[in-house]
Image: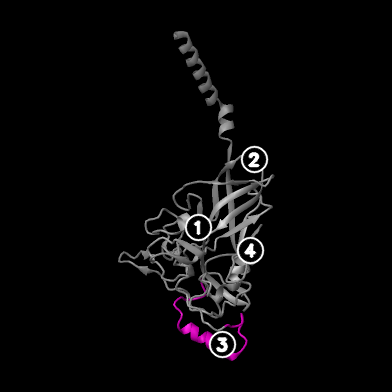
Amino acid sequence: MLSISKSNSRASLLMAMLMLSPLAAVAITKQKNISVNFEAMVADQPFACGQSYQGIGLSKSRITPADFRMYVSEIELIDDKGYATPIKLKQEGIWQYQNTVLLDFENGSGPCVNGNSGLNTAVVGTVPNKHYKGLRFTLGVPAKLNHGDATTAAAPLNVTSMFWTWRAGYKFLRLEMATSGFPELPKLKVKSADGKPVETEEKDGPETVIAESDSKPSVLTDKNDAEKAKMVKKKRKIAGFPVHLGSANCVSPSKTTPALSCANPNRVTVSFDDFNSDKNSIVVDIASLLKDTNVDYTFTNAGCMSDTKDADCKGIMSNFGAPFNDQPAYPQDFMRVK
């Protein structure tokens, strides 16, 4: 019995030594670091807080962005055989949580004062060390993370300016801008007694958008339309022309109860067949997003808030690659590989 025990012990020791050898360790943990970089652009110009851009949208408007942030999730690389491998995100406690990342292109300067000084333009993590040829991800927050209390959530889901209500969830994308037609920018942050800015939760959301019942053309065509546009400006709750993408028509017992379901989840799958993280980046183009929209005119009092009744969203949702009312989802025309 003793000899058998020694034999088993030696075998166990030999196995442990093999498992701890460098070659075995490499075989088990053969991973590589990965970084997927994003660039915010307005046509062929880099996005910058305080810079103005001409010729945007159907109205060929002059816009001055005041915010640009978005959540992406479920980021995967596609190998030569077409199989998807999720990127294991670095859980650094600031920009990345579980499988979700907040991309922040504004730096809190100039008209972007309602934002913050931090920037994040990359998804970072690890994947098995092999060759990949494509990229796929979701524009939006996963359903299991989308409905909760943003004030107690882990970063980056604790940014209350990227949140509507428990029912509607997060703003997957937030774009704020002044335009030629709506030159007023959002008001500055409220400051506390010690002079530090206080970020306050906004009360807008897809469930509060009120769309006018009569239909109008996408561009101003006569004096009557111009008068209607002036009337809408007078009753606007939000300055400038904002674009907030998020889930709409969500059902829950109250605004502080997680949604049971959302008729329009508005999560968009973005995929590129030819992407090399060592050479390429993803361009996020504001001009492409707005190309089918007159940003100097609004059908509602709050720009595009993702509601199916919101006529300001028709062209924008199409370019996001999301369905809108009876309009099916078309291929997104908002991001491209560089």
**Nearer to us: label 4 or label 3:** 4
Q: In which quarter of the image is the C terminus?
A: bottom right
x and y percent of residue 38 in the render?
Answer: 58, 56
Rounded to the nearest angstrom, the CA distance separating label 4 from label 2 is 29 Å
Q: What residue type is labelled 4?
A: Gln
At x 53%, y 25%, the residue is 19
Q: What residue type is labelled 2?
A: Lys
Q: Is mark 1 on a helix, strand or loop?
A: loop
Instruction: Quickly name the residue at label 2.
Output: 130
Up-down: is 200 above or below 18? below
Q: Quadrant of the N terminus?
A: top left
Rounded to the nearest angstrom, the CA distance separating label 1 from label 3 is 38 Å
Rounded to the nearest angstrom, the CA distance separating label 4 from label 3 is 31 Å
Q: Are marks 1 and 3 in contact (CB under 8 Å)?
A: no
On screen, residue 337 versus residue 119, left or right, reads: right
x and y percent of residue 325 in the render?
Answer: 57, 71
**186 or 226, nearer to the observer:** 226
Label 1 CA crowd tier, 10 Å (few <14, some 14–19, many 20+):
many
Lower sequence index among marks 4 and 1:
1
* Camera sees residue 170: no
At x 50%, y 12%, the residue is 7
Instruction: Quickly name the residue at label 3.
Output: 226
Lower sequence index among marks 1 and 3:
1
**Nearer to us: label 1 or label 3:** 1
Instruction: Quickly name the residue at label 1.
Output: 141
Lower sequence index among marks 3 and 2:
2
